[in-house]
Image: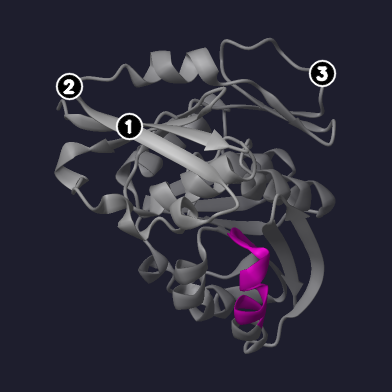
Amino acid sequence: MEFSYIGYTFTVAPLQPASEILIAELAELGFESFVETEEGIEAYIQEKDWKEDILNDVFILSNQTFKISYTFKNIEQVNWNKEWESNFQPITVDDICTVRAPFHELPTTTYDIVIEPKMSFGTGHHATTHMMIQHLLELDLKGKNVLDMGCGTAVLGILAEKRGAKSVDAIDIDNWCYLNSVENADRNDCKVISVFEGGAELLVNQTYDIIIANINRNILLQDMQAYTARLSDKGTLLLSGFYEADIDVLDQEVKKSGLTLSNKKVKNKWVGLRYQF
C-alpha cells in the first residue's frame, strides 16, 4: 500500500542537542522517518496523521535557546531506503560495538550489529540508544532473560543476544517497528529473540532478569509498575528516553517497587538510568 506524506525541512541552530530533542518530540506526534542534514533535519509524517496545528505542542520550537525554522510540503512517494542509505553512517560505541548498515564495511569491534532502520527508531545515533548500548556492554548478560520494551529496530535486543542472553523478548506497539525488528533479528542471525507487537498488556506471566525500556517519560510513568512486576528478585531495570529534568519524577515511581539507582549516564541532556533490586 502506498501512502501520501507531508515532508518538513527544519533548519536548526545550534544543531545539537536541538536536533535530537526535536526528533524525539516529532516521533511522539507520529512522524515516521527522519533524515539528518547539515542544517537540521527532514521529517516525514503520513498525510492521514497530519493536521495543520500538529507542531503547536512541540516545546522546543518555542525555546529561545535554539533558532528553528521550517517549511513543509506534500510528498506523494518517498524512497525511504534511498534517503536513509545516503545519510546513515555507522557508529561505534566505546570501541566495542558497531551499529552499521549491510552496505558498510565489516568492522573490527567485538560486536557487529547490522540493521536497516527504515521508519523505526533506534540506530544508535540517538543519545538514549547510545547510552543503553553502554549499559548493556557493562552488564553480564550470559544466561539472562531479557525484555527489550519499545524495541524500535531491536538493536538493543540483538546486542543482548550477542552478549549471551538466554532469551530476549522484543516488544513495540508500532507496526513498522515490529516488522523492522523481525527483519533485523533475522539479518543478525538471532536465535533467541522473539518479537511481539503491542504494549505493556503483553507482560503477563513472564519474569526477566534485565528489562530495557527506552521509550519516553509519559509511557515509562504509565507502565512502570507493569515493568517492575515482571523483574526477577535480583533483576536490573534500564531506563532511557527522557531528559535530566525528568529524573526525580521517574526515580520516585521506580523506587515504589524497592529498586535502587546504581548507575546514571547523561548525554546531551538525555539520561540513561540503571536500577537494581
Marks 3 and 1 sit apart, C-alpha to C-alpha, by 41 Å
The residue carrying mark 2 is: 76
Q: In which quarter of the image is residue 250?
A: bottom right
N-terminal label among 2 and 3: 2
Count of marks placed on residues = 3
Q: Which residue is drawn at 62% across and 62% down?
A: 243
Whether the residues at callouts 2 and 3 have beta carbons within 8 Å, the answer is no
Report if residue 121 is visible in the image: no
Q: Which numbered marker is on residue 189?
A: none
Q: Residue at x 56, y 21 (%)?
A: 88
| Secondary structure category for the residue under label 1 | strand
Going by the numbered disc 2, the residue's amino acid type is Glu
Residue at image mark 3: 108
Which quarter of the figure is the C terminus placed in? bottom right
Q: Which badge, 2 or 1, is on the more N-terminal residue? A: 1
Residue with the mark numbered 1: 71
Q: Is residue 216 left or right of residue 271?
A: left
Residue 13: x and y in percent read 58, 37
| The magenta segment | 239-251
- On the image, the x and y values in percent for residue 67 come to 53, 43
Mark 3 belongs to which amino acid? Answer: Thr
Residue 106 position, x and y percent, is 71, 13
The amino acid pointed to by label 1 is Thr
Q: Is the magenta stretch mostly helix, strand or loop?
A: helix
Mark in front: 2 vs 3: 2
Q: Where is residue 46 in the image (x, y as percent from the top left)?
A: 22, 38
